């Protein structure tokens, strides 16, 4: 891991403290934790039919249709596996939608498409966390707030953490650094991973997704981002 590329709070916590074993359940309110390695899975060959939630809330991700099933690929990032989405039809449905309006969503991903956007997390009303111009373009939270036209890095793994306190604020962090803030204006109803309802699909890899039913505090968010940055050598 290159510490110089990490924001000061994250960098300082890595350099100046002993990192003990951390997992997302150590912070209260975790309602979804999908980990490509640790989560129990069922397969159709190398494709994933279901990957189970580790939070204890049974918010599993499932895809019964074989042509729409993401691929399980080993040893992709820091020796860890990923869920690979083909950008054509692959996506997961939540077992039951997450409807909390104030949440923290953290997702580790790399986009491998620089020409068209794709949705990471979405709902039936097309509210989504979305790569507007593909991996090297603008990261947006559609109908919430744009994170600005900065390079999200095609072919590079990133940690995107969104702290949403409806209706007052939403903060978007990349690899521990704040990139933008705004005011959310819709209630969340998350039910899709890897596509928007208008069938714009994500192309790339996702090794981990974590959702809390509350906005994390700044120290908690730093702990979470530090864990993910360390886990994937970002």
Image (spheres, grey):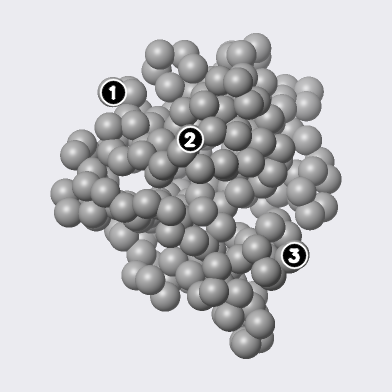
The residue that mark 2 highlights is 138
- Provide residue 155's location: percent of width, then percent of height: 71, 37
Q: How many marks?
A: 3
Q: Which residue does the numbered mark 3 point to in the structure image?
A: 1
Say few, some or many: other residues with alpha carbon within 10 Å of mark 2 (under 14 / 14 to 19 / 20 or more).
Answer: many
Q: Examine the rendered structure and indicate whether residue 15 appears above or below residue 91.
A: below
Q: Earlier in the sequence, mark 1 or mark 3?
A: 3
Could you tell me how far apart the alpha carbons at marks 1 and 2 are, in whole angstroms? 21 Å
Nearer the observer: mark 1 or 3; the answer is 3
> Does any portion of residue 97 appear in the rendered image?
no
**Pair 2/3: label in front:** 2
Separation of residues labelled 1 and 3 (CA atoms): 38 Å
Judged by depth in the image, the label closer to the viewer, 1 or 2, is: 2
Residue 146 visible to the viewer: yes
Q: Assign a secondary structure to mark 2.
A: loop
Residue occupying the point 66% across, 21% down:
86
78 displayed left or right of 92: right
* SS for dot 1: loop
* First of labels 1, 2 by sequence position: 1
């Amino acid at each position: 891991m290159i510490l110089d590329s990490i924001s000061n709070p994250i960098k300082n916590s890595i350099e100046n403290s002993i990192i003990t074993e951390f997992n997302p359940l150590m912070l209260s309110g975790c309602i979804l934790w999908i980990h490509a390695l640790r989560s129990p899975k069922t397969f159709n060959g190398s494709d994933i039919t279901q990957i189970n939630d580790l939070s204890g809330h049974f918010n599993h991700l499932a895809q019964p249709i074989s042509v729409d099933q993401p691929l399980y690929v080993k040893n992709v990032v820091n020796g860890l596996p990923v869920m690979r989405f083909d950008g054509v039809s692959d996506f997961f449905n939540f077992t039951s939608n997450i409807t909390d309006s104030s949440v923290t969503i953290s997702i580790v991903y790399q986009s491998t498409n620089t020409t068209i956007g794709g949705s990471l997390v979405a709902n039936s009303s097309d509210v989504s966390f979305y790569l507007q111009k593909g991996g090297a373009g603008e990261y947006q939270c559609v109908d919430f707030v744009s994170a600005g036209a900065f390079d999200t890095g095609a072919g590079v793994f990133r940690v995107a953490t969104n702290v949403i306190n409806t209706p007052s604020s939403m903060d978007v962090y990349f690899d521990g650094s704040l990139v933008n803030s705004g005011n959310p204006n819709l209630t969340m109803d998350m039910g899709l991973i890897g596509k928007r309802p208008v069938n714009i699909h994500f192309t790339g890899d996702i090794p981990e997704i974590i959702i809390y039913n509350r906005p994390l505090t700044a120290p908690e968010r730093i702990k979470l981002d530090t864990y993910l940055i360390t886990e994937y050598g970002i």
